[in-house]
Image (spheres, rainbow, N blue to C red):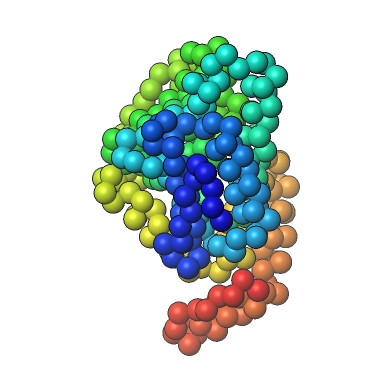
Amino acid sequence: MTFETLTIERPHADVLLITLNRPDAANAINTQMAKDLLVLFTSLASDEIGVRAVVLTGAGSKIFCAGGDLKERNGMSDEAWVHQHRIMEQALFCMHDTAVPIIAAVNGAAIGGGCELALAADFAYASNNARFALSETSLGIMPGAGGTQNLPRAVGLRRANEIIFSADRFTAEEALLWGVVNRLFSQEELVESAVTMAARIAENAPLAVRQAKKAMREGLTIPKRDALQFEIDLYHALVQTRDRQEGVLAFNEKRKPEFEGR
């Protein structure tokens, strides 16, 4: 697949590396990038690409994504603004529905919608020079790409209130301390480390990883007892898979399992 604003690579047979590629515009999300992300995540959500893990990063060494392209939006009519945002909304829903794990590799500033992209991933790594902000309230709007939902789930409501109400920036170290990112790396090590983790995830039984992701994501939205039953139902669905048989057999034969996703 080729895109105007994204680059796509396969650094590992089962890993897709996506790079937001508008470095001259701070990797900001314009209409074309929103369209490209929608096409890509639609394909991922429908399993058309056939990977087991995804890494999302930005071009360059300073900026992951500066959020919505305010130069393009300058003077944009209300109707055009809403139409553009609808495209990104659909892309984010498809990103949410993607069954395989998504790791954000935040290589620099992640501001506004860029921070929301990182929060929409299943987990995130960041470079030491990364900085973050949900700056929308300073622009007369509010987070509208999952920020008000994903940030409280990551850092807790009271911390999220402070971040969103103030629109203040915070550092990579604060992001690590608060739970926005899982680990920090040097700029040189970041993407390689994220890809290495994605490849490690890809070694595990793909159906099991997908079911575990589904259990956690959906389970948090329903009462705990219902979530426990949901987990059990997903678990039992794995018992009858060939991968479950292969995993146990490989363990007893003291060899590495060969999972097929069946």
Residue at 49%, 57% (x, y): give it.
16
Up/down of 34 relative to 160, above or below: below
Q: Is residue 220 above or below residue 254?
A: above
48, above or below 35, in the image: below
**Residue at 51% across, 14% down:** 139
Q: Is residue 87 visible?
A: yes
Expressed as whole percent of the image width and height from the top left, the position of residue 238 reads 67, 68
Judging depth in this view, the residue of 128 and 60 nearest the camera is 60
Q: In this view, does 109 lie to the left or right of 33?
A: left
Residue 88's spot in the image, x, y percent?
A: 62, 34
- Can residue 153 be seen? no
Residue at x 46% of width, y 42% of height: 20
Q: Nearer the viewer, residue 256 or 140?
A: 140
Instruction: Tell me if residue 174 comes above or below residue 259 in the rendering.
Output: above
Q: Looking at the picture, tell me which residue is in the foreground, 37 or 244.
A: 37
Left or right of residue 209, residue 127 in this image: left
Residue 253 placed where, x, y %? 48, 87
Q: Quadrant of residue 94?
A: top right
